[in-house]
Amino acid sequence: MLGNHDAGATIAVSDMAAARSFYEETLGLEPSEDMDDAVLYASGNSRLLVYRSDYAGTNKATAATWAVGSDFDAVVDDLRAKGATFEHYDLPGATREGDVHVLGESRGVWITDPDGNILSIVDM
């Protein structure tokens, strides 16, 4: 039933101004809809809802992933130039080349937003 429909990520933040700065200036997303304590961003065919919550930053797992394909190196370089800090994890079967985790033929990086929400960029 749901397999024929797009899914979106929903990310809780504590400070909408800081979140908007990160998602718009660092990640380059443009708001498609502004609400009282939330912003909806379009990202390809997906939607990302960023909303204010008292539970912001409590998720300790990846909240959203962007599969950027062959743009991976350019995206990573752009994030680095914008001051993004890359997370490093000890993942089974993975090696690291600088900030990039290598899992077989796949590569990925992780960053966090101002509330510590974990975001992933992969070359798939």
Image: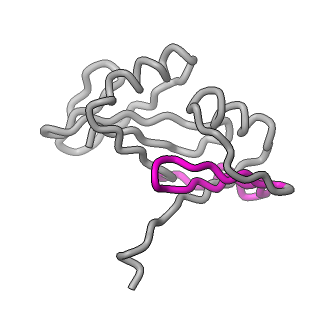
| Image coordinates for residue 3, horizontal then vertical, percent | 35, 76
Q: Quadrant of the N terminus?
A: bottom left
Q: Nearer the viewer, residue 99 or 67?
A: 67
Specify the farthest residue to the top: 81
> Looking at the rendering, which quadrant does residue 75 occupy?
top left
Question: Residue 48: percent from the left, percent from the top?
Answer: 58, 53
The residue lying furthest to the right in this view is 36
Residue sitting at x 73%, y 55%: 51
| Rendered position, 121 above or below 37 | above
Q: Nearer the viewer, residue 81 or 104?
A: 81
What x and y, as percent, mark residue 31? 68, 44
**Residue 89 position in % (x across, y down):** 36, 36
Q: Is residue 74 left or right of residue 42?
A: left
**Residue drawn 51% across and 14% down?**
81
How many numbered discs sit on the rendered protein?
0
View extreme (bottom): residue: 1
Magenta region, residue range = 37-62
- Is 64 magenta? The answer is no
Vertical order, 49 against 16 (above or below): below
Residue name at image x 46 percent, y 55 percent = 45
The answer to whether residue 109 is left or right of residue 8 is left
Classify the position of the C terminus by image quarter.
top left
How is the structure coloured here?
one colour
Residue 65, relative to residue 122: is it above or below?
below
* Magenta span includes 38: yes
Q: Quadrant of residue 4?
A: bottom left
Residue at the spot 26% in from the left edge and 31% down from the top edge: 70
